[in-house]
Image: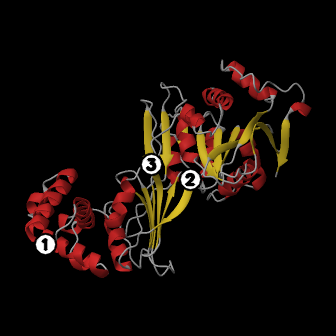
Amino acid sequence: MSLRARISTPEEHAGRGEDGHLVASYRAKLLEEIDLAEMSSLAAAERRARLERVLGHIISREGPVLSTVERSQLIRRVVDEALGLGILEPLLEDASITEIMVNGADAIFVERGGRVEQLPLRFASADQLMQTIERIVSTVNRRVDESNPMVDARLPSGERVNVIIPPLSLTGPILTIRRFPRSFTLQELVGFGSLDEHMVYLLAGLVQAKFNVIVSGATGTGKTTLLNALSGLIPSHERIITIEDSAELQLQQTHVVRLESRPPNVEGKGQVTIRDLVRNSLRMRPDRIVVGEVRGGESLDMLQAMSTGHDGSLATVHANSAEDALTRLQTLASMSDVEVPFVALHDQINSAVDVLVQLTRFADGARRITEIALLDSHGGEPYRLATVARFDAQPMTPDGRVHGVFRYFPLPRRAADRLYMASQPLPQAFGVARTADQLATREAR
């Protein structure tokens, strides 16, 4: 993208009211005084500093008379709109914001601490919002128009952006930017109250003993954050292949191969799906396969990999409970172009999946593991889930917080034996069930 495309013209962003006219006026004066050829040779930070310096000289020379704070705000706004993303720039720099949701020009929402709030900000017009959207998607060599009204992409800085515009959107251009926090360890998640020490020891043993783990939860419950933390428990000498739609995982091991799917180009060609990558990964001698999210026919390939020698694989799936996760995996696997009877898929899941970790986001914004369940069924048996850890929530307190208690239950003998053979200690809080009656089991469809 050219520098002139990055530095907008006043007509593109004509604002409403005196404030908008002031910004547009100074943006025009700024463009008259800078050398585009010289600016294009500067790094982004140097380019911004140069623009701020030039604009400061213009304001000192021509007025108006402003306080130090007003002057700084004007300079920031003009440069943001000329070089950055306008009113979204401060939001992207705010580390406390995890999601930015623009519902048309007049409604901007953000998520902080798990809670959504509306901000007193707005774009001057739908055209200004569209210019911002076009600037964002152009950084990833994509375009958005009536023939291609939806875009889902990862920005170079790591954020995931989704765009949908009219006529599909009836409320104007819609922009959603999801920011991913730095990776957290399980111990740090304990500090947030997402789980406790006993669950950490259990999950560490399960991952290192190469149980196949499915992390399940609704949107925004922290599945990727937990998946990243769990993957940190994989021994450093193992070869790990990560497969994602948008690269979000941040593994710290040395032997990691990161694969990312690719959407079709503007001609509708060149698409590489998650399923393509899962199939290819099996030829890359993986010790572990980590799939950021299964949402289609790749579920079948992943299940086959899990049950044919690639133990210790990790994946996430959208579901509201552990039972729903099993049903969803079965449904997704049936979407494959290989016609496999539902009964056979049921057997495949019983053979492949060992552990289900369910995440929930509560009304106070807290994200917690609400269940760890082991799949203790075989072959054609109905799914039989043995809950080994559970969070029992209490009613919300007057201060708006949700508290609760983590509870623990005995492990099935088969799982305990696998931990023992892998030299992984069994946390005392759990124990081993001597009889089937001691298990907290339930059947799922």
Q: Is residue 66 left or right of residue 370?
A: left
Q: Quadrant of residue 258?
A: top left
Q: Residue at x 13, y 72 (%)?
A: 29
Q: Position of residue 214 (x, y in %)?
A: 65, 43
Instruction: Please name which of the two marks, 1 or 3, marks the residue nearer to the observer.
Output: 1
Q: Is residue 418 left or right of residue 249?
A: right
Q: Residues within 10 Å of mark 1 (few under 14, many from 20)?
A: some
Of residues 51 and 8, the one drawn nearer to the viewer in this rendering? 51
**Label 1 sits on what residue type?**
Lys
Q: What's the mark number on residue 247?
A: 3
Residue that numbered label 1 is attached to: 29
Name the quadrant of the N terminus: bottom left
Q: Position of residue 156 (x, y in %)?
A: 34, 53
The residues bearing labels 1 and 2 have C-alpha atoms spaced at a distance of 42 Å
Instruction: Please name which of the two marks, 2 or 3, marks the residue nearer to the observer.
Output: 2
Q: Position of residue 192 (x, y in %)?
A: 58, 39
Q: Is residue 53 left or right of residue 171?
A: left
**Label 3 sits on what residue type?**
Ala
Inspect this view and state whether residue 372 appears: no
Q: Residues within 10 Å of mark 2 (few under 14, many from 20)?
A: some
Residue that numbered label 2 is attached to: 114
Q: Earlier in the sequence, mark 1 or mark 3?
A: 1
Inspect this view and state whether residue 192 appears: yes
**Label 2 sits on what residue type?**
Gly
Of residues 159 and 351, the one drawn nearer to the viewer in this rendering? 159
Q: Are marks 1 and 2 in contact (CB under 8 Å)?
A: no
Q: Residue at x 69, y 19 (%)?
A: 421
Q: How many marks?
A: 3
